Each structure stands twice: as structure tokens, then as C-alpha cells.
């Protein structure tokens, strides 16, 4: 037991030191993060309270729906937790840098297993627990549950987490013995990505918006029947539902103890099985995860040719950075695989425009099409900002521990940042223009709207990319092992907030002028002089906002990087 | 070639380097010695341009590092003690990247890269990802990169870390050859034997201050230990009490 706590102590002390360190602005960062988390928490709570209150009000049918929803939520959490545990197990059991020291020490494999198992559980579960809590509190509130419900809630959560953790660990231990850990991580990542894309596309193609369209219901009876059918009794989500539900609807809860016992014993059994599996397979798997495969790379592949021609206009130093960043991106599976998600996002984005029921609207189609086209500028800009936070914002942090190479080289930081800017601008510009041009084409908008949208988004992307590079330099995380985490930090949040404000300013400044020109053009009436002057003023404002957005963030990033010292 | 004028570096309350002035001439190997935490790596990193001095000036090849960083850094080759590299590039791609940063043309790159890979015994590995290299191979790749643009100044932090005896001998020979070619080399090391073997002058830094500087013979004379061993002189000059502490710790003396 002492060894178990000793093995977990570095995590505890690291966490403690992070709070003790008292970096400049860390209290502020923590406060903002807490506020955002509280916002999400409250939104989930309110959403579920409203939905459940609505369900409850529907006689007979409503309660079935609420119970079904509870089962679905637990099932979703179970799937999420198992997957999250698999990914975390790969890091905590096989890829973590401190493992070599731990394995070289005279510590039993069993102690290592239980300490790492606990760490895995905490790392993969805290977020689900935090954001899941308001859901089940909402159930308690709406159904006016007593203290017994909340006690049972606590009683089911612990075995539920242990069970999903144990399943994840067993699965990973077996996988790593078949493939090396690094390869397993890549395979899982691709599988998850493919699964998410398929589910996303399938869900969208099912056109869920038709559920609120009464014409779409051919047989309400068959729908009702399908919803009444029970879930599989072998799933833990079913057991939990059977433990908690009786306490919500004052039903006899004689079965409740049985299912609680079933859940607890299964969790304990799975944890012990995971420990046995670790005794059998962990040593071999860990040894295998240390092996690296050799692979020869060609110097004149298609990517080299592409990089050569696209970087021709740049200086040799910038070309070197372009080549390095592009190759690193395409050789890192966790990076390039996100392009697949991006493609799915574009397909669904455009698909949404193709199925808009414009003709059913009471507003004249012609106005509506152009109105949506205008709003689309904001929407597409926001999509670009979301891509920006994932790809552009981490661009500086991507240098990682190798940042010393840049700092000790004759390359100026100004050129370094502008090169990064030019690396990320073209792909985002292409995506933005594809979104705008194709959606406008699907909407069949006027040439004026087409021109104004394409030009507006063009300059907005220039600004968003600059904001990403600039703030990425103000909040770099060179020490991070997982580059995807860079976007989720405080800097990423600041980037999203400023992007949203920037896009809103552009859209608000353009709204009145665009509407005025559009109406005048449609009615064939010339614009009075004062209106023309206001329009010019508004567009000048937009240009000013764009210019500021292009220069200020990179300038700030430059100052910040210059003041910073490389390790 | 390398000139430090009253350079100070503070980390909050700690004075890591304190009013340090020194000079390394062309064709000279200067060994920078001192116990852990004495300020060797901080000084090396300030000269390499990855740390900024709190006060004082650094000149490389006559150029003020703060005022003309681009020109000054063009003459420098830097070999850090920890080989952090871009893991997803191959060895050759890494050298091509460095060539881009230091303005080495493609024609020269091909020839120089082949020579350096041959010299550092990396030819077989040049088209494989850096992530598959061992620690020593990464260290040799960094050395290749530092020498690619034929620098006039070479700054080396712990040159022998991670190298096998064969690699260590190779590095010592390379340093001697570079000295003959007029390159100024500043290296920090804990390995007294290496310093004694290759350095023309040695500086000992203690608590951020240059405690003593001179040739090996001058240092030995100053220490006046009567021993031929440089280790004895070093221990005496740096306080010498570490030896007693070590002996007490190991309980080999009574």
C-alpha cells in the first residue's frame, strides 16, 4: 500500500507545485477557466432540467422517454470512458517518460499496475464525472428525488468508472502485445477518427430536423413501440438505470440492490482480471513499446516536389521552415488524420445548405437566400476560427523543445512568425472560400452577395490566421508532449473569444450597408449621398479592423517571443 | 572572436552569471569548467543567443549579439548538451533545414552533408527519421548541423555527453582540426581529462564569476599541489573540500 501511494506521489506533488508556483496571471487564468467550466456546467444543467420537465409533463410516454434517455446517457458515458481509458492507458502504462525509472526500480509489477490504473482512471474520468453530474442532478431535481437517489448515484459512479477503466486497460494490454504501443496509438486514433466521421455523417444524413416535422411521421405507433423496447440487460448502463430509476419514480426498488451488487461485483471482477492480465502481458508489452521500427524515406517524393514548387517565392530560411512544418504535419498521424474530420465537416456544412427548406418559409425566398448568405459569412468565419485554434494557434508551440534551433539560428523571430503565417494562410483561405462559394452557389444568391461574401471572408481569414500565430506566440507551450492539448489551454480560449468578437464586429459593420445596397439594387433605386457616405464609413471600419487584426497580434507575439528565453 | 564584456544574468533573485568578462581568440580552444550550477550553461546559452543577458555585451566575430543578432549568429555553430531535434524529419532533411536557416546553398549542402554524415558515421541513417536515432546519434547529428555552415565560432555544451569512446576521440580530433583552421571554440565540460587534453586555455567559473583563467600549466602552478594531475589542481582551486565530503559520504576514510 505504501508503494502504491509512493508511486502516485509525483503526480500529487506536481499538481501541488503547479498551484504553489504562482506564475504571473495564473490566478486570473484559473478564474477564467473556472468561470467557463461553470458556464458549461450550468448550461448542461438547465438544458436537462428543461428537457426532463418537458418529458415529465407528457403523460405515460414522457417517463419512458426520460428513462430511455438516462440509459442512453450512461451508455454514451460508458463508450466514452472505455475509449478514453484505452488512449490514457497507452500513455500511462507504455509511453510516459518516467516509466523507465519506475521499471528499473525494485518495485513489483502489481504495485506499478495499481498505481498506474488509478492514474488512468483519474485522468480519463474526471471530465466525464464533472460534466455528467449536472445531468443526474437534473434528474433528481425534476423528479423530486430523495436523499436515497443521490446516495445510490454515488454508489454506482465508482464501480462504473472502475468497470470502464478495467475494460479499457485489458483491451490495451492485449493490443500492445500485438502491435507496438506507438503503432497502437496511431491505429486507435485513426479508428476513432473514422468512427466519429461515419457517425457524424450518418447522423446528419438521417436529417434529425425531420423529427419535429409532423409530416415525416408515418406511424407514431411504430415509433412509440421502438422506444418502449428494453435495452440489452447485459450492459452496465441498463444496470445503473435499474438502480437509479426506481428512486426517481417511487417504484418498488427490490431489484435495485440486485443490480447495484451486479455492477459492483462485475467492476471488482474486471479490475482483478485487469491485474492478472497485466501480470501476464504488461512486461512483454512494455518491452515491445520501447522498440522502434526502421524506415527509409525518399528525398524526392511527391511531397518534396510540392513543397519545392509552393515555397519557391520565399527566402531559403522560410523555405526551410515550410518544408520542416509540412513534413512534420504529414508524418504525425495525430495531425494529418484531422484532415479527415475537416473534410467531413465541409461535406456536412455544404449538405446543410442543400437541404434548407427555404421554399416552406413565409419570407420571400429571394430575400431569405441572400440574408442566409450574409449570415453565412459569420458562420464560415467561425468555422475557420475553430480550425485556427486547432491548427494555427499551436503552430509556434509545435517547435517544442527544438525551439533552441530557431533561437540560436540567424533567422529573425519576425521572419519566423511571418513564415508560419504564410504556411497556414493558404489552406485556410481555400477552405473558407470553398465553404462560401459553394454554399452561395447552393443558395443561388445574387452576384453582389457572392462578391461581398468572398471578399469579406478573404480578409477575415487573413486576420484570424494572424491572431492564431500571434496569440500562439504569446501563449506558447513548448514543453507539451501532445500538441492537440495546446488548443485547449487558456491561450486557445482567448483566441476563440477574440475571434468571435472580431467576426461579430465585421458582420455588424457590414450588415446595414449590405442590406441597403442589396435593396437598392433589387428595387433599381439609386442610393442617396448620405447613405453612400455611411456605407463607405462602415467598409472603412471593416478594413481598419482587418488591418489591425493582421498586424497587431503578430506584433504582440513577436514582442512576447523576444522577451522569452529558450531552454 | 568571442568577447564577453561585464555580462550578468539574473533569474529573479539568483545571479547565475555575475559581471563576467572573457575572450576566446581565433584558433583557440577555451575550456569552461566549474561545478554544477556555477553558470557555465547559462553563459554558453547567452553566447548562443537563446538567453538574453540582464546586462553587459557579447561580441561574436566583432558583431554585437544584441544589436546585430542575425549577422552575429551567422558565424556561430552551437552544440547543446541535450539533443532536442525535430523527430519527424530524417537526418538529411534536418541538415537541409539547417542549411536553409544559415543560407547554405543546395549545391554546397549535398557535398557537405555527405562529408559530415561520413565523418560522424551517420551515412547509413541519413534517410531515417530522427526519432529512431539513439542519444549518441542525435548528438552526432547536432554536431554535423553545427559544422554544416563552416562557422568561425563553435560553442559546445558538454561535448562528450552520450558519445562512445570512439565518438569522443573523433570529436577531440575534429576540435583540433577546427583550431588549426582558425575556429574559436568555447566548450563547457565536466570532464577534466578532456579539458586538459584539448584546451589551450581554461577558465574556471564559480558562482557565476570567472574565478581563474589561464593555460593548463598556469592553473597547475597557481594551485601549487605538486601533482601532475589537473584534477588535483582543479579541486584545490575550486575549494577542494568536495573531495573530503565525497570521502565522508562513501565512508572510506576514518
Image: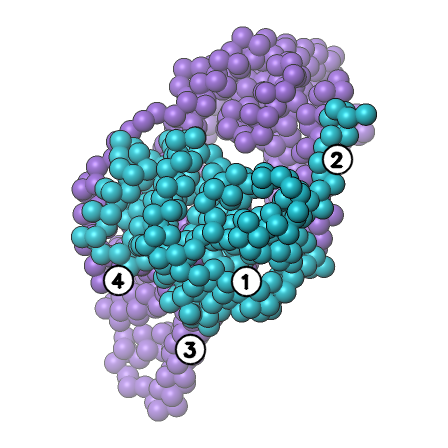
Chain colours: A purple, B cyan
- Assess disc 4: are there few (<14), some (14-19) or many (≥20) residues with their C-alpha within 10 Å of its C-alpha: few
**Labels 1, 4: front one:** 1
Q: Quadrant of the N terminus of chain A?
A: top right
Residue behind mark 3: A544
- Assess disc 1: are there few (<14), some (14-19) or many (≥20) residues with their C-alpha within 10 Å of its C-alpha: some
Q: CA distance from mark 4 to mark 3?
A: 27 Å
Do dots 4 and 3 share one subunit? yes
The quarter of the displayed image where residue A514 is located: bottom left
Do dots 3 and 1 share one subunit? no
The kind of secondary structure element at disc 4 is loop
Question: Between disc 4 and disc 3, whose residue precedes?
Answer: 4
For residue A209, say whether it is visible: no
Disc on res. B244:
2
The x and y percentages for residue A428 are: 33, 56
Relative side of A507 to A312, left or right: right
Q: Residue at x 26, y 56 (%)?
A: B104
Q: CA distance from mark 1 to mark 4?
A: 39 Å
Residue behind mark 4: A314
**Could you tell me if the residues under marks 1 and 2 are in contact, i.e. CB atoms within 8 Å?**
no
Do dots 1 and 2 share one subunit? yes
Do dots 3 and 2 share one subunit? no
**Outermost residue, front direction?**
B226
The kind of secondary structure element at disc 2 is helix
The kind of secondary structure element at disc 3 is helix
Residue behind mark 1: B22
Chain for disc number 2: B
The x and y percentages for residue A550 are: 41, 69
Chain for disc number 1: B
Which residue is at the front of the view, A521 or A414? A414
Amino acid at each position: 500500500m505504501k508503494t502504491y501511494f509512493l508511486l502516485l506521489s509525483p503526480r500529487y506533488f506536481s499538481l501541488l507545485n503547479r498551484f504553489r508556483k504562482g506564475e504571473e496571471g495564473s490566478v486570473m487564468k484559473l478564474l477564467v477557466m473556472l468561470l467557463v467550466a461553470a458556464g458549461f456546467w450550468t448550461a448542461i444543467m438547465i438544458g436537462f432540467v428543461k428537457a426532463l420537465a418537458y418529458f415529465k409533463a407528457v403523460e405515460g410516454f414522457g417517463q419512458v422517454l426520460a428513462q430511455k434517455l438516462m440509459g442512453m446517457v450512461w451508455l454514451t458515458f460508458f463508450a466514452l470512458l472505455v475509449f478514453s481509458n484505452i488512449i490514457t492507458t497507452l500513455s500511462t502504462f507504455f509511453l510516459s517518460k518516467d516509466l523507465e525509472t519506475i521499471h528499473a526500480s525494485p518495485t513489483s509489477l502489481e504495485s506499478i499496475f495499481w498505481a498506474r490504473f488509478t492514474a488512468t482512471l483519474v485522468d480519463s474520468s474526471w471530465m466525464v464525472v464533472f460534466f455528467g453530474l449536472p445531468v443526474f442532478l437534473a434528474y433528481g431535481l425534476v423528479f423530486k428525488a430523495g436523499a436515497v437517489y443521490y446516495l445510490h448515484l454515488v454508489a454506482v459512479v465508482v464501480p462504473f468508472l472502475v468497470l470502464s477503466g478495467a475494460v479499457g486497460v485489458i483491451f490495451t494490454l492485449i493490443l500492445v502485445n500485438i502491435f507496438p504501443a506507438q503503432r497502437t496509438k496511431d491505429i486507435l486514433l485513426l479508428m476513432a477518427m473514422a468512427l466519429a466521421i461515419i457517425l457524424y455523417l450518418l447522423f446528419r444524413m438521417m436529417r434529425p430536423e425531420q423529427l419535429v416535422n409532423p409530416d415525416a411521421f408515418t406511424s407514431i405507433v411504430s415509433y412509440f413501440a421502438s422506444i418502449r423496447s428494453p435495452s440489452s440487460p447485459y450492459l452496465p448502463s441498463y444496470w445503473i438505470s435499474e438502480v437509479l430509476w426506481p428512486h426517481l419514480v417511487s417504484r418498488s426498488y427490490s431489484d435495485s440492490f440486485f443490480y447495484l451488487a451486479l455492477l459492483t461485483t462485475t467492476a471488482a471482477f474486471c479490475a482483478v482480471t485487469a491485474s492478472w492480465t497485466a501480470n501476464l502481458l504488461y512486461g512483454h508489452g512494455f518491452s515491445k513499446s520501447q522498440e522502434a521500427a526502421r524506415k527509409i524515406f525518399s528525398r524526392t517524393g511527391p511531397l518534396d516536389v510540392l513543397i519545392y514548387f509552393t515555397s519557391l517565392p520565399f527566402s531559403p530560411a522560410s523555405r526551410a521552415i515550410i518544408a520542416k512544418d509540412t513534413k512534420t504535419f504529414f508524418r504525425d498521424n495525430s495531425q494529418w488524420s484531422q484532415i479527415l474530420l475537416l473534410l467531413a465537416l465541409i461535406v456536412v456544412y455544404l449538405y446543410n445548405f442543400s437541404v434548407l427548406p427555404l421554399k416552406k418559409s413565409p419570407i420571400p425566398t429571394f430575400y431569405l437566400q441572400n440574408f442566409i448568405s450574409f449570415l453565412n459569412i459569420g458562420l464560415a468565419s467561425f468555422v475557420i476560427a475553430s480550425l485556427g485554434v486547432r491548427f494555427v494557434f499551436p503552430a509556434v508551440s509545435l517547435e517544442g523543445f527544438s525551439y533552441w534551433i530557431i533561437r540560436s539560428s540567424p533567422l529573425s523571430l519576425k521572419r519566423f512568425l511571418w513564415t508560419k503565417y504564410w504556411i497556414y494562410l493558404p489552406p485556410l483561405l481555400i477552405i473558407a472560400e470553398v465553404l462560401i462559394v459553394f454554399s452561395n452557389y447552393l443558395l443561388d444568391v445574387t452576384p453582389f452577395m457572392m462578391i461581398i461574401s468572398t471578399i469579406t471572408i478573404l480578409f477575415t481569414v487573413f486576420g484570424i490566421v494572424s491572431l492564431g500565430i500571434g496569440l500562439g506566440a504569446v501563449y506558447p507551450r513548448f514543453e507539451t508532449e501532445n500538441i492537440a492539448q495546446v488548443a485547449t489551454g487558456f491561450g486557445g480560449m482567448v483566441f476563440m473569444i477574440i475571434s468571435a468578437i472580431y467576426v461579430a464586429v465585421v458582420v455588424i459593420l457590414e450588415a446595414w450597408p449590405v442590406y441597403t445596397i442589396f435593396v437598392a439594387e433589387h428595387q433599381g433605386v439609386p442610393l442617396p449621398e448620405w447613405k453612400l457616405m455611411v456605407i463607405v464609413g462602415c467598409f472603412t471600419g471593416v478594413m481598419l479592423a482587418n488591418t489591425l487584426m493582421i498586424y497587431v497580434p503578430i506584433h504582440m507575439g513577436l514582442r512576447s517571443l523576444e522577451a522569452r528565453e529558450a531552454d | 572572436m568571442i568577447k564577453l564584456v561585464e555580462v550578468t544574468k539574473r533569474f529573479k533573485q539568483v545571479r547565475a552569471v555575475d559581471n563576467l568578462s572573457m575572450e576566446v581568440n581565433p584558433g583557440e580552444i577555451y575550456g569552461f569548467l566549474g561545478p554544477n550550477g556555477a553558470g557555465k550553461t547559462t553563459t554558453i546559452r547567452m553566447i548562443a543567443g537563446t538567453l538574453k543577458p540582464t546586462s553587459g555585451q557579447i561580441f561574436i566575430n566583432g558583431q554585437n549579439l544584441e544589436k546585430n543578432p542575425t549577422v552575429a549568429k551567422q558565424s556561430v555553430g552551437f552544440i547543446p548538451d541535450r539533443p532536442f531535434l525535430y523527430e519527424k524529419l530524417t537526418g538529411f532533411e534536418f541538415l537541409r533545414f539547417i542549411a536553409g536557416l544559415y543560407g547554405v546553398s543546395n549545391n554546397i549542402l549535398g557535398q557537405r552533408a555527405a562529408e559530415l554524415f561520413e565523418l560522424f558515421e551517420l551515412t547509413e541513417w541519413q534517410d531515417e527519421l530522427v526519432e529512431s536515432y539513439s542519444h549518441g546519434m542525435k548528438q552526432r547529428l547536432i554536431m554535423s548541423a553545427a559544422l554544416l555552415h563552416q562557422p568561425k565560432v563553435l560553442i559546445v555544451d558538454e561535448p562528450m555527453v552520450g558519445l562512445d569512446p570512439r565518438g569522443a576521440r573523433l570529436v577531440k580530433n575534429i576540435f583540433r582540426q577546427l583550431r588549426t583552421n582558425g575556429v574559436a571554440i568555447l566548450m563547457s565540460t565536466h570532464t577534466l581529462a578532456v579539458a586538459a587534453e584539448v584546451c589551450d586555455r581554461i577558465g574556471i567559473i564559480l558562482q557565476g564569476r570567472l574565478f581563474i583563467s589561464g593555460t593548463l600549466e598556469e592553473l597547475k602552478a597557481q594551485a601549487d599541489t605538486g601533482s601532475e594531475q589537473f584534477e588535483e589542481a582543479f579541486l584545490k582551486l575550486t575549494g577542494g573540500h568536495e573531495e573530503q565530503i565525497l570521502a565522508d559520504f562513501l565512508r572510506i576514510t576514518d
